[in-house]
Amino acid sequence: MTYIDFYFNVENKLNKIQEILEKEIFRKRKIFIAVNDLNSAESLSDFLYTASTTSFLPHIIGHQEERAPIHIGWDYKSVSDDFMINLKSDISSSFSRYLRLIEIVSQNEEDKKTARDRLKFYRDRGYEIQLIDATKEI
């Protein structure tokens, strides 16, 4: 069964993604990041290349056949079954194939509203959900 983490009250989604990726890469996880479109994928890729001067987060965009621990895409097609970070407002029809789904919710009201709809969808189907308040993390 897929375990779902909702990080909410996130001040900066990109910084939170970097934090999660650095932990999971160390654990040898394969991660798919679902974004809205190619522009979003390229922006995230640019951020990942420049976010840290002490580490590199190897990733690919789109449907390249190369193997990399991080795959960024917009149509939910991925070679990874470990983790999915969903940055889209909709729900992937294949989310349950992942061991863990991570939802990142900003402090923006529209983002919170769509996240509540996704949370209700997952709860109504009996998924185990962990709610993590980003303002209280150490």
Image (spheres, rainbow, N blue to C red):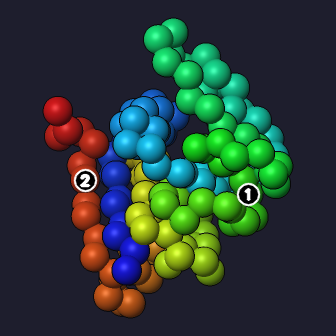
Viewport quadrant of the C terminus: top left
Q: Residues within 10 Å of mark 2 (few under 14, many from 20)?
A: some
Question: With respect to residue 53, does 13 lie above or below?
Answer: below
Q: Visible in this render: residue 115?
A: no
Residue drawn at (46%, 73%) of the image: 118
Give percent across and percent down for residue 114: 50, 66
Question: Who comes first in sequence, dot 2 or dot 1?
Answer: 1
Task: Tell me if 18 is positioned left or right of 71 in this view.
Answer: left
Residue drawn at (36%, 67%) of the image: 4
| C-alpha gap between disc 2 and disc 1 | 25 Å
Q: Between 12 and 51, which is closer to the camera in this rendering?
A: 51
Give percent across and percent down for residue 65: 81, 51
Q: Amino acid at mark 2?
A: Ile
State the image quarter where residue 107 is shown.
top left
Question: With respect to residue 113, does 26 lie above or below?
Answer: above
State the image quarter where residue 90 is shown.
bottom right
Question: With respect to residue 127, does 130 lie above or below?
Answer: above
Determine contact: label 2, label 1, CB under 8 Å: no
Q: Say which mark, if any, is on residue 132.
A: 2
Assign a secondary structure to mark 2.
Answer: strand
Q: Which residue is mark 1?
A: 74
Q: Between 96 and 36, which is closer to the camera in this rendering?
A: 96
Residue drawn at (72%, 65%) of the image: 77
Task: Tell me if 88 is positioned left or right of 121 in this view.
Answer: right
Residue drawn at (44%, 64%) of the image: 101
Q: Between 136 and 97, which is closer to the camera in this rendering?
A: 97
Give percent across and percent down for residue 74: 73, 57
Q: Residues within 10 Å of mark 1 (few under 14, many from 20)?
A: many
Q: Amino acid at mark 1?
A: Trp
Q: How many marks?
A: 2
